[in-house]
Image: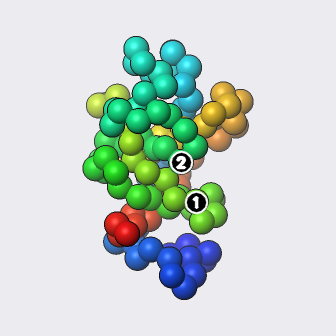
C-alpha cells in the first residue's frame, strides 16, 4: 500500500507491478484523433491507457504521490499488462521513459 494513503483514502482492491511507458498527443504516438481517448474523453493530466484494465478504473501509481489516474485510453493491442501515462509535454514523457512500476487499483467511490 502506498505510504501516503491515509485515513479516508480509497480502498485498494488489487496491487501489481507492470511496465509503464509515457505518451502525449503527438500524431505519431496516437491514432487519427490524437486528443481524444478511446473512451471519448479529451486527453489531460491523470489519464492512462491500459488494455488489461476496464475503462474507468481508478489507479494509483507509485512515484506520483496521492495522484489518482483513470483508465480512459487503450494502447496498441500488442501491449498487454502495461500502463501508458499521458503527459502534456513531450519532454516530460521522454524523461519518464520506460520503467517498472507498482500500481494499485482503487475501489469505486
Q: Position of residue 64 (x, y in %)?
A: 62, 58
Q: Is residue 82 visible?
A: no
Q: Nearer the viewer, residue 67 or 3?
A: 67
Residue 59, compared with residue 23, is above or below; it is below
State the residue position of label 1: 67
Vertical comparison of 95 with 4: above or below: above
What residue is drawn where x is 50% and y is 77%?
9
Identify the residue shown where x is 34% and y is 28%: 76
| Frontmost residue, 92 versus 33 | 33
Color encoding of the figure: rainbow
Q: Secondary structure at mark 2?
A: loop
Q: CA distance from mark 2 to mark 1?
A: 8 Å
Does residue 53 show up? yes
The image position of residue 96, as x and y in percent, is 65, 41
In screen coordinates, is 77 left or right of 72?
left
Quarter of the image for residue 98 reads top right
In the picture of the structure, the residue carrying the numbered disc 2 is 46
Amino acid at each position: 500500500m502506498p505510504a501516503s494513503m491515509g485515513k479516508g483514502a480509497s480502498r485498494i482492491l488489487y496491487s501489481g507491478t507492470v511496465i509503464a511507458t509515457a505518451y502525449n498527443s503527438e500524431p505519431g504516438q496516437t491514432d487519427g484523433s490524437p486528443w481524444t481517448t478511446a473512451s471519448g474523453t479529451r486527453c489531460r493530466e491523470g489519464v492512462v491507457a491500459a488494455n488489461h484494465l476496464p475503462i474507468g478504473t481508478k489507479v494509483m501509481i507509485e512515484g506520483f504521490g496521492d495522484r489518482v489516474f483513470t483508465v480512459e485510453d487503450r494502447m496498441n493491442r500488442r501491449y498487454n499488462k502495461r500502463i501508458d501515462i499521458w503527459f502534456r509535454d513531450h519532454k516530460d514523457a521522454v524523461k519518464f521513459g520506460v520503467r517498472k512500476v507498482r500500481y494499485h487499483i482503487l475501489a469505486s467511490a
